[in-house]
Image: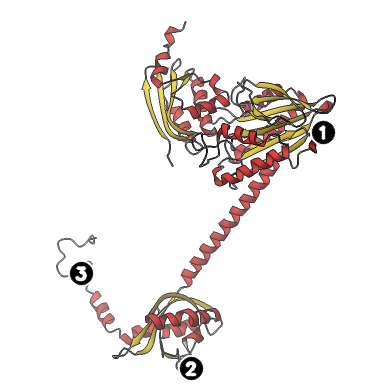
Amino acid sequence: MTELTVRTRTTPAGPVIELAGELDHASAPDVRALLPGLALGAGQQLVIDLSGITVCDSSGITVLLAARNHALAARAGIALAAVPARVSRIIHIVGLDRVFPTYATARAAEAAWAPPSAHP
Amino acid sequence: MCPADGGDSGGDRAPGKQPGDDAAFAALLEDSAEDLYEHAPCGYLSTLLDGTIAKINTTLLDWLGHARGDVVGRRTFSDLLTAGGRLYHETHFAPLLRMQGEVSGIALELKAADGSRLPVLVTSTVKTGGDGQPLLIRTTVFDARDRRAYETELLRARREAEREREELKRLNATLQQTLLPPALVSVPGLNVAAHYHIASADKVGGDFYDLFPLTDGTWGLFLGDVCGKGATAAAITSLARYTLRAAAVYDPDPAAVLSNLNTVLNHEYNGTDPRFCTVVFGLLTPDADRDGFRITLASGGHPPALLIRADGSADFLPTPGGQLIGVLPDAHIATTTVRLDPGDTLLLHTDGLTEAHTAQLGDGDRYGDEALLDFVRALGPTTAAHTVAAVRDLLDTFGTGVDDDTAVLAISVPRPPSEEQQ
């Protein structure tokens, strides 16, 4: 059974959470627990890189929603990067493709981010 | 492992040895082998090959409450055992001893003079003479009361745990039952069938469905899936069920029903541990000529329903853009309207079915939407009862591959009797 590997890194655009393995009922609390410790400023963007995800069930969806709530509370944005086809299908069925901007890579998500000063 | 006072002053003196110890050692040396035998912290006995007790120590006599004269030459070892112990001795212990010359650590029960039982661990060896012929049997007997009490306690704890597990399973099953309608109501001109597959007896799942009458001869139906399992999921399932029924009475428009549910759940569960459900809600309106139904389906992020037509064709009934219920303040609800004519069947399901692990089929190792579509295409034309029975059989073939609960609800409009006979 592959477990979930979580790595976080910081970019000028904001933190990036890299997830690999199984995002499910067992691993979801770990990811939720690290959200409050993220250095996420107003106007920044939280990116969740899903490139290594093999399993994402409904508990995994709650993690994405918790991350979104966290970002909204910090008046920051959120984006998904490198969403595998299976996860993309689930996100589409539950209608969250309207809620999460999605990019091919974390780098593309960073590039798309505009510093707060760019917004009037 | 050096004693703390062993240091460099050690020499030939034992660490910590005091002058007074010499007297103690002298007393120990005078401890005779005879006294050690008689008062050893275990029981000793020697028996002839026929089991007759030839010698027994005081320790064992004291445990049993017998006088030496009542035992030596008068009783066999077997006589000291309980009826069960005697049987075991005759059938296992003694034959093994004859074959191997030694038997060790066998748990038996001795019967004391006052009738009480003494659990013991028995080890016996056969003493042989110079010519290899067996002469007698030497036996040591250890008091196993503490050990037996410990084992009994372990057994009791284990039985208790098993009982509690059974009780939990029973409670889960009961709770699950309360989350489902006891029986689906009968709708004139409509066949209805449903099935709930429980994936785990230990945790309550979060799938739900219902079918119920509304005013003006219309009917409401829903089927949904709460994320997660266990007590919290069950609480949300219960809230979702009652909210859906109440909301449908208040305003039966399917999109409005799901919007109301979204508002209720969003107020109740959000923040760091968001909970959501996906639901299909349908409003069934009988045609004026009563030979079919108009169905408006609203979907909140739920897998699309399947429509199997009377001509055998089948396809998903997409409701694109509908969003899951409970986490987004203004969740978008997608609706679609279809007619269900005689011979048509509508199937609603939760994704426990399509997410089931399967060895043979595509979409990774999961059953998948395409396989489900092929499956119902092979069924058509069909009926609600037949479709649900077929899905039930399908779930059975997956066995433990179904790792999430699965609910299916099907409705169909019967063909006229003249057509059914063809």
Residue B14 got which mark?
Answer: 3
Percent position (x, y) of residue B244? 71, 30
Q: Nearer the viewer, residue A24 or B377?
A: B377
> Residue drawn 57% across and 57% down?
B162
For marks 1 and 3, the one nearer the N-term is 3
Mark 3 surroundings within 10 Å by alpha-carbon count, few (fewer than 14), some (14 through 19), many (20 or more): few
Task: Answer with left or right where residue A90 lies relative to residue B379.
Answer: left
Mark 1: which amino acid?
Answer: Pro
Mark 2: which amino acid?
Answer: Arg
Q: Nearer the viewer, residue B304 or B326?
A: B304
Task: Answer with left or right where residue B178 lies relative to residue B187.
Answer: left
Q: Nearer the viewer, residue A24 or B392?
A: B392
For marks 1 and 2, the one nearer the N-term is 2
Percent position (x, y) of residue B172? 63, 46
Residue picked out by circle 2? B74
Q: Nearer the viewer, residue B82 or B334?
A: B334
Residue picked out by circle 1? B416
Judged from this view, the residue extending furthest toward the front is B422
> Residue drawn 82% across and 27% down?
B215
